[in-house]
Amino acid sequence: MMIVVNTRHRKQEAELEEARFEQNLFINNPAMYQEYLKNKEDNAENEGAVWLTPQSSEEIEELDKIFSEINEQLSDNSDEKEANDEFIKQVGLMELFGNINVDEIGDE
């Protein structure tokens, strides 16, 4: 129950912060405020997600089971994760060689 109260409180704070942002934007830059409203309306039309909370303890247990299975699958791929991390490191190092002129290397 406390989580719900905290979530509602954070949502109210976020709405208040957004209202302050919109007010400052309207005062300081009306043209940008108009674009902001247009973009906000476009995004509102494209939102199709509906957030639901579990209605019973059975749903909570089922969701918990699903998430624990996903977590197990992700933890099983530790070798793959290490390989991906190594690949990311190697790509990062390759960028350091981007400014080397290969034509100037070698024949002396």
Image (cartoon, rainbow, N blue to C red):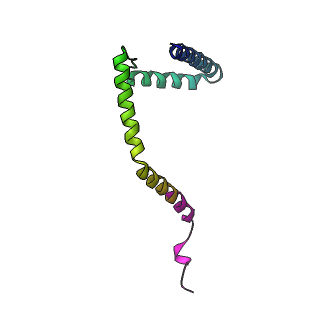
Percent of width and height locating residue 77 = 40, 47
Give me the residue at 50% from left, 12% from top.
1
Percent of width and height locating residue 26 = 61, 19
* Nearer to us in this view, 88 or 17: 88
**Residue farthest to the bottom, as pictured:** 108
User: Residue 83 lies in what quarter of the image?
Assistant: bottom left
Magenta-colored span: 91-108
Q: Is residue 55 magenta?
A: no
Q: In the rendered view of the protein, which quadrant contains the C terminus?
A: bottom right
Give me the residue at 53% from left, 22% from top.
34
Rendered position, 10 above or below 68: above
* Nearer to us in this view, 3 or 34: 3
Percent of width and height locating residue 58 = 34, 18
Rendered position, 96 above or below 6: below
Q: How many marks?
A: 0
Give me the residue at 40% from left, 20% from top.
51
User: Residue 64 lies in what quarter of the image?
Assistant: top left
Can residue 48 be seen here? The reply is no
Q: Is residue 37 left or right of residue 25?
A: left
Can residue 93 be seen here? The reply is yes
User: Residue 48 lies in what quarter of the image?
Assistant: top left
* Nearer to us in this view, 104 or 88: 88
Percent of width and height locating residue 97 = 55, 65
